[in-house]
């Protein structure tokens, strides 16, 4: 079995870089090489598609490392995607965009979605915040709690023009 | 005079782009010139010496293994305010990645003899944007996040806040909160006049302060609440000439 996987991985890598990228750029899941992240993305993308959410994933370069505990990262990604899907479904044309950029020593994740309603900047990071009303959206508080323990992670949020964007950047510690 | 650079590994494409661009420049009388039509990334980089606000038309997939994204990164380093336009053979490249991480202007899909007109239309759009920028040059704050530099209009910034994480700072605008590595002390030095240190952990935009609550020791800045320290109060008094 192990003899089989190596040539496949090499083929996969070559395929991705030259041909694969060109043929199926809009589904660059093949570039996501961290198993937990890949699994989560596959299942979330499938679920969102089923709900009628137009999904877009970009992973220009292979994502091989995360720079933090992969399970924590996966959990954070899951929270962001759940929130994004929930908010998007309140709009007329729901979509979710996931951009993963792996560079030397840094991984950047960007999740965007449209939203309806108002966002109160003072409450946005509080426990229970959600554009759907009070008491929902405990996810974001967990998200920030997980990341509070990661000194090499930075998060940015913006909500201009009816589009909610969450960015998570993880610097690889040397 | 704005310099235009082309990079594509196919001679026919280089010729097509150069012809279309030069024709457009001629009939519109733009103050621009195509100064380079390189076949490799290295050739292009060797030509880009002192470029300021150049316009770069780049093939995304260069056959010598060159990487359009990495080329864009390097060009951004040398010409932070340049315009990057990507040319691709395939309709669906990872466009958002280029757009967000390189601030790429647009991308054009090669479509036989329609490529020339598409490039010409793109040049028109770039020209319009350059005119806009010149007419209304907004003072920008440069934010470094790793290899990338983001530009935020200074007038959009409400305040800087010391983040819980050591050496991290939050930048607040009306519709965002960005997290970056920085120091309020350095920011205060850098932005002195327009910002006021109302608290050890808050550097607020002077012209965005709405309410000063001396008793409650807080300040309302563009809808956000900041803490106000005794030193902060003194700063406010000093700046406002005694009344606020």
Image: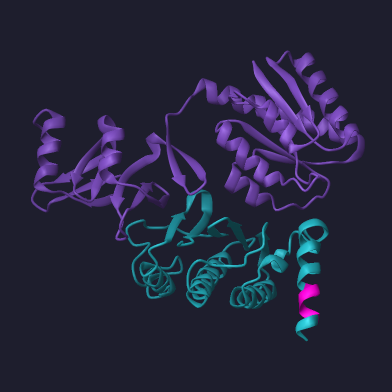
- Please provide the residue range marked out in magenta: A4-8
In the figure, the shade used to draw chain B is purple
The x, y position of residue A12, in whole percent, is: 78, 68
Looking at the image, can residue B16 be seen? Answer: yes
Q: Residue at x 61, y 76 (%)?
A: A40
Q: Does residue B198 appear to the left or right of A8 in the view shown?
A: left
The x, y position of residue A105, in whole percent, is: 53, 57
Q: Quadrant of residue B10?
A: top right
Q: Quadrant of residue B106?
A: top right
- In the depicted structure, whether residue A153 falls above or below residue A7: above
Q: Which of the two residues, B42 or A15, is positioned nearer the viewer here?
A: B42
How is the rendered protein coloured? Answer: by chain
For the N terminus of chain A, give its image quadrant: bottom right
Q: Residue at x 56, y 31 (%)?
A: B81
The x, y position of residue A103, in whole percent, is: 58, 55
The x, y position of residue A171, in whole percent, is: 47, 59
The cyan-coloured chain is labelled A
Task: Check residue A6 for magenta coloring.
Answer: yes
Q: Main secondary structure of the magenta part?
A: helix
Q: Which of the two residues, A105 or A43, is positioned nearer the viewer here?
A: A105
């Amino acid at each position: 079995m192990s003899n089989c996987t190596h040539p496949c991985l090499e083929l996969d890598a070559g395929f991705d870089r030259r041909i694969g990228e060109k043929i199926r750029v809009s589904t660059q899941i093949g570039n996501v090489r961290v198993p937990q992240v890949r699994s989560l993305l596959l299942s979330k993308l499938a679920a969102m598609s089923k709900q009628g959410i137009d999904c877009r994933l970009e992973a220009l370069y292979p994502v091989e490392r995360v720079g933090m505990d992969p399970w924590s990262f996966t959990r954070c990604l899951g929270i962001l995607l759940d929130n994004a899907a929930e908010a998007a479904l309140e709009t007329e044309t729901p979509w979710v965009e996931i951009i993963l950029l792996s560079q030397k020593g840094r991984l950047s994740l960007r999740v965007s979605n449209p939203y309806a309603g108002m966002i109160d900047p003072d409450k946005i990071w509080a426990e229970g915040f959600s554009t759907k009303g009070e008491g929902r959206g405990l996810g974001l508080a967990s998200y920030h709690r997980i990341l509070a323990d990661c000194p090499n992670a930075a998060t940015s949020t913006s909500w201009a023009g009816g589009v909610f964007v969450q960015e998570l950047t993880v610097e690889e510690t040397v | 005079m704005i310099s235009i650079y082309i990079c594509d590994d196919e001679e026919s494409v280089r010729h097509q782009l150069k012809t279309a661009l030069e024709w457009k420049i001629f009939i519109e009388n733009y103050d621009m010139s195509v100064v380079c039509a390189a076949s490799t990334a290295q050739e292009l980089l060797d030509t880009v010496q002192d470029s300021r606000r150049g316009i770069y038309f780049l093939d995304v997939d260069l056959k010598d293994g060159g990487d359009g994204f990495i080329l864009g990164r390097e060009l951004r380093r040398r010409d932070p305010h340049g315009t990057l336009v990507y040319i691709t053979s395939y309709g669906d490249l990872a466009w958002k990645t280029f757009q967000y991480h390189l601030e790429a202007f647009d991308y054009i899909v090669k479509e036989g003899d329609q490529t020339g007109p598409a490039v010409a239309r793109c040049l028109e759009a770039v020209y319009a944007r350059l005119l806009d920028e010149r007419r209304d040059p907004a003072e920008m704050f440069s934010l470094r996040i790793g290899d990338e530099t983001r530009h935020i209009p200074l007038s959009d910034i409400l305040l800087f806040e010391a983040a819980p994480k050591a050496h991290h700072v939050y930048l607040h605008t009306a519709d965002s909160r960005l997290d970056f590595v920085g120091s309020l002390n350095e920011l205060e030095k850098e932005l002195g006049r327009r910002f006021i240190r109302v608290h050890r952990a808050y550097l607020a935009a002077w012209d965005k302060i709405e309410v000063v609550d001396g008793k409650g020791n807080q300040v309302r800045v563009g809808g956000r609440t900041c803490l106000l320290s005794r030193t902060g109060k003194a700063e406010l008094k000093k700046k406002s000439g005694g009344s606020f």
